[in-house]
Amino acid sequence: MTIVLSDALRPIRDRFLVALADRERAVRAALASLEAGGRDPSALEAARYAVHKTAGTAKTLGFPELGAVARACDDGFVALGRGTGDAALVNLLTEFLRQSADIRARHA
């Protein structure tokens, strides 16, 4: 019996798509904090974790563009920790949300 890799990954990809909704919530909370001129540490840490997890798995599961933007977001959080990059991170997180929502809608 031949198993196609994409078929073998389907259950993992399905769990990933469900997890994206939670990750979007974390990113939205961080985005709201940044847009309000604040830096809520718990919101930022939750979002950083969310994009880091996404960066590590999205490409493998067939979503390379989301993986790339998630990796850029991860780098943006590093810059934010150095005191720079607020505007760039806001743009990256917004793009993450756009791509994530689009992927979930296409695979609903």
Image: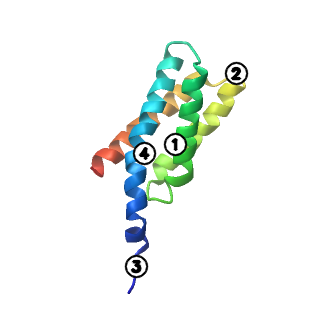
Q: Going from the N terminus, do you reach mark 1 or mark 2 first?
A: 1
Numbered disc 3: secondary structure: loop
Determine crowd level at label 3: few under 14, some 14-19, many 20+ residues with C-alpha closer than 10 A.
few
Quadrant for residue 94, please give it. Answer: top left
Q: Is residue 40 left or right of residue 19?
A: right
Q: Nearer the viewer, mark 3 or mark 1?
A: 3
> Which element carries disc 1, helix, strand or loop?
helix
Identify the amino acid type marked 4: Ala
The residues bearing labels 3 and 1 have C-alpha atoms spaced at a distance of 30 Å
| Circle 2 residues within 10 Å: few <14, some 14–19, many ≥20 | few
State the residue at coordinates (47%, 20%).
Answer: 32
Q: Position of residue 100 (x, y in %)?
A: 40, 42
**Labels 4 and 1: the sequence-earlier one:** 4
Q: CA distance from mark 2 to mark 3?
A: 49 Å
Q: Residue furthest top?
A: 37
Residue 64 picture location, percent across and down:
48, 54
User: Depth-wise, is mark 4 or mark 1 nearer the camera?
Assistant: 4
Q: Nearer the viewer, mark 4 or mark 2?
A: 4
Kindly identify which residue carries mark 1. Answer: 69
Residue 21 rendering spot, x and y as whole percentages: 38, 39
Residue labelled with disc 4:
19
Q: In this image, 64 relative to 81: left or right?
A: left
